[in-house]
Image (tube, rainbow, N blue to C red):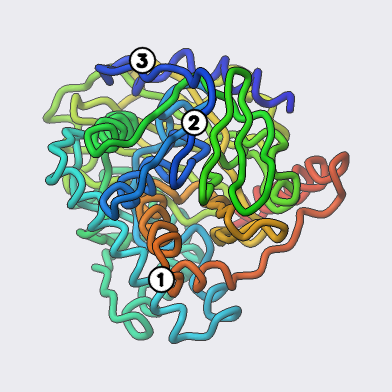
Amino acid sequence: MHFLSVDRELTRHSYYADTAVRAARHPALQGDADCDVAIVGGGLAGLSAAIELADRGFSVRVLEAREVGFGASGRNGGQAIHGLACDQDEIERQLGLDEARRVFAMSIEALEVIRQRCARFQIDCDWRDGYLGVATSAGKARDLLAGADHLETAYSYPLRRIAQSDLPQWIDSPRYRAAVHDPRSGHLHPLKYTLGLARAAAGLGVTIHEGTAVTALTPGDRPVLHTANGRVTARQVLLAGNVYLQGIAAALEPRIMPVGTYIVASAPVDPALAQTLIPCGAAVCDNNFVLDYFRFSADHRMVYGGRVSYSTATPMNLAESMRQRMVGTFPALAGTPVTHAWGGFVDISMNRAPDFGRLPNCPQVYYLQGFSGHGLALTGLAGRVVAEAMAGDATRFDTFARLRHRPFPGGRLLRMPALVLGMAWYRLKDALA
């Protein structure tokens, strides 16, 4: 697909890549190999599953087409947030309230997984507690507070409600009308975390192959993954490559779309200014459909995301347009230059719910996709539940697998233009609100 060449270019100016040390490189596969579980994709989902499987005594190989953390796992906004990308009412509608509660509880477990792994494997990834959801209009404020009410009454998950008059104690910006705060969510340096998971997996005996693109999958009782220089035969396979599977599981492709998302990092600012602008130190995200998200890094840079592309075309003048969005939110940063501008592609599903399951023609092949831009925490939980399923207890995995997913309309040729038109409508709704 043509977006892959665009994606490679977008990696070049990543703040994360410039501030994370790759202490280890993993050799490409040469020849044939055999293992209990072969995993396609060296990102957060694949590495999390590898750790869980190794803990259960499985022999595991991870095949990564480029390098560990190349995709969204190493380039995202760094925000680990409760819940899913879709609203809880989508899960309630499909599974009922009791099962929706179990899914939400697993999203909270996902936050604890990050903390546990950082402690167990001594991963220094600049974790900081706190998430602030904000609203840009009176209507959006009503939606935000109604969502908080629903989480508290239906899910026993309280969020602190913050009125407009109290906002300067939490965030000093003229844009917002209300906020909710969650102390259990938080933010981190995603590439440092991903590389830490790779180091942990290798330490548990997992074999990782970088520069090893899977070119074909042969289903069967023992599926085979083919690469340019060898093959891996396994009892079970996990596809965790999301938009990068490049045709090896064609049945999955119509249910996800690659959506470009873009981030800038400013030059470091005075720590006192950073403390003034976001006194709570939290990650921040608004509740628009086409949203902005941002946080201060450990070295006091504003890391600001917000532009999206549903056509895979990189926005014009990316760094400057993102800087203007940043300054619109924080006028005090008007004189602060942007030093990094990068992006990447996330895999969205039609309903924004995660899409987990097994291939229809080969139940030995599992897949995890459709994190829809909300996967920093959920990928860890996904790795855990798919490992449970491979080890014989599919209860939690099958809860997710029961979620129904429709293909994007328009077929291979028209589905992307249709999505562009749909997103234009949602942008208009956000603007009118």
Q: Nearer the viewer, residue 213 or 350?
A: 213
Residue 204 at x, y percent in the picture: 24, 39
Quick one: 342 or 266, which is closer to the camera? 342
Within-10-Å neighbours for mark 1: few <14, some 14–19, many 20+? few
- Amino acid of disc 2: Ala
Q: Residues within 10 Å of mark 3 (few under 14, many from 20)?
A: some
Q: Is residue 100 above or below residue 74?
A: below
Q: Mark 3 and mark 1: span between their CA atoms?
A: 52 Å
Residue wearing tag 3: 337
Secondary structure type for disc 2: strand
Q: Which residue occupies 69% across, 42% down?
A: 218
On the image, which quarter does residue 161 sit in?
bottom left
Mark 3 or mark 1: name the one nearer the start of the chain: 3
Comes first in the chain, label 2 or label 1: 2
| Image position of 223 (left or right of 71) | right
Residue 320 seen by the camera = no
Q: CB under 8 Å between callouts 2 and 1?
A: no
**Residue 266 image position (x, y, % from top left):** 33, 21
* Image coordinates for residue 275, horizontal then vertical, percent: 15, 37
Total number of numbered labels?
3
Specify the amino acid type for callout 3.
Answer: Pro
The residue pinned by badge 2 equals: 33
Of badges 3 and 2, nearer the viewer stands 2
Q: Quadrant of the N terminus?
A: top right
Q: Nearer the viewer, mark 2 or mark 1?
A: 2
Report the amino acid beneath label 1. Asp
Residue at (50, 73) in percent of width and height: 399
Disc 3 and disc 1 in contact, CB within 8 angstroms: no
Q: Residue at x 75, y 42 (%)?
A: 420
Relative depth, front residue between 380 and 345? 380
| Viewport quadrant of the C terminus | bottom right
| Residue corresponding to mark 1 | 393
